[in-house]
Amino acid sequence: MPNPTGYPELDALLPRLEAIPDLGVDALASELIAVLGRKSGALTEALKSLPSLPLDQRKGYGAAVNQLKAGFEVAFAARREALESERRRNESAGIDLTMPARHRWVGSEHPVTRVVDEIVEIFRGIGFTVAVGPEIETDWYNFTALNFPPDHPAMDMHDTLFVDAPPIAGERGGRLLLRTHTSPVQIRAMLESPPPVRVIIPGLVYRNDPFDASHAPAFSQVEGLAVDEEISFVDLKATLVHFAHQFFSPSTRVRFRPSFFPFTEPSAEMDVECQLCHGGGCPACKGTGWMEILGCGMVHPAVFEHSGVDAERYTGWAFGMGPHRIAMLRYGIPDIRLLYEGDMRFLEQFLPGGQRGSRAAGQRS
Ligand code: DAH
């Protein structure tokens, strides 16, 4: 910092003097006017005020202003010279500084990631904690502990991808497979910590499905589990209605339909009012006005037994939903494959605040 002058209004200019070597062409020009401009530059004004000062102060103040002014003049000249020689260097190197800059790629969350995060946050807000489990599971966790009888037709629902590897020592169950749902993490969560349990479980699951407009061999699920004394279907309904109101909108209507899952009894599926036509009926909801978003139910006593939980004392409820599907319903995406292709023209529609990446601007980085 240059030496203080002892006059506060002059000293206030010292940081600006010091900043001059960093100014660009335009900033330098406007700073020159702001400090030395003939009409209302800060130092010009200071000089103009001299005649109104008492005689004994004029000399000292005038000298200080002039010294500072000289300092600014030297600094402005030096910076101007530096910028000019930089310009000449660039020119001779063939660099054109007037060319428009390349845009940076703007990254953002994938729409499915955003949906998963929103779901998890809503449940975290009401006391659930996040749990995760392995994507390579054993048949015990994926089926047996969830009350799928061996070779029961219910297993047909899950066209399973088996892993050709020897069983893992110490793990319950025989064959290794890619988990077909996140429900096995229910078992792991209860074996790990006894009730009360309130967990929200995001993760990828795998099925031997064709890759078409409505199926993918790998997709996301979010599972929820609440186990405690005196938990009832009322808690299940109230919590899932709360979720739907938070996630979609406070006026979204929901309905529960009876269903079947081996690991819950009774079981239900929850529909929400179609987010595109709001109940009127449209192609996306096949004219019904409703969209199915999740399966749920009261935890089956057999599941508790496999998880070391006393089914006489505890009850619980669980649900599973598919964020890929929910993203499709929410954003009106007609083909699930769009969520896997990584095509920027598609993904850019989900940038926050309608920003556009460089491709759309016709430029490549
Ligand atoms: N695991 C089921 C599936 O992948 C979804 C599900 C249904 C999970 C009901 C649950 C539940 O926890 O209670 O189709």
Image: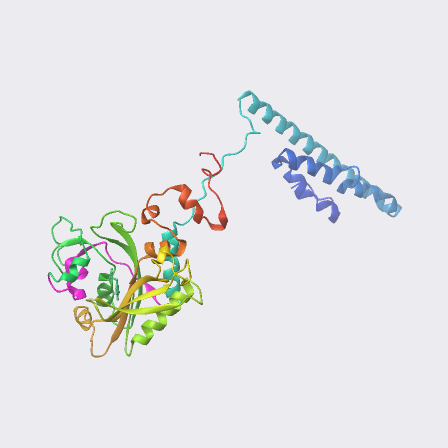
At 40% across and 44% down in the image, what residue appears? 346
Q: In this view of the protein, which residue sits in the foreground, 293 or 34?
A: 293
Residue 19 falls in which quadrant of the image?
top right
Looking at the picture, how far across and down is residue 26, in whole percent? 65, 35
Looking at the picture, how far across and down is residue 72, in whole percent? 71, 36
Residue 157 falls in which quadrant of the image?
bottom left
User: Would residue 10 appear left or right of 26 to someone viewing this image?
Assistant: right
User: Would residue 13 appear left or right of 190 to someone viewing this image?
Assistant: right
Q: Is residue 319 above or below residue 282?
A: below
Is 135 magenta? The answer is yes
Is 40 magenta? The answer is no
Give the quarter of the figure containing the N terminus: top right
At 17% across and 71% down in the image, what residue appears? 302
Q: In this view of the protein, which residue sits in the foreground, 286 or 240?
A: 286
Quarter of the picture for ligand 1? bottom left
Q: Is residue 174 above or below residue 54?
A: below
Q: Is residue 126 visible?
A: no
Q: Which residues are magenta?
A: 128-150
At 25% across and 75% down in the image, what residue appears? 315
Q: Is residue 57 above or below residue 282?
A: above
Looking at the picture, how far across and down is residue 306, in whole percent? 17, 68
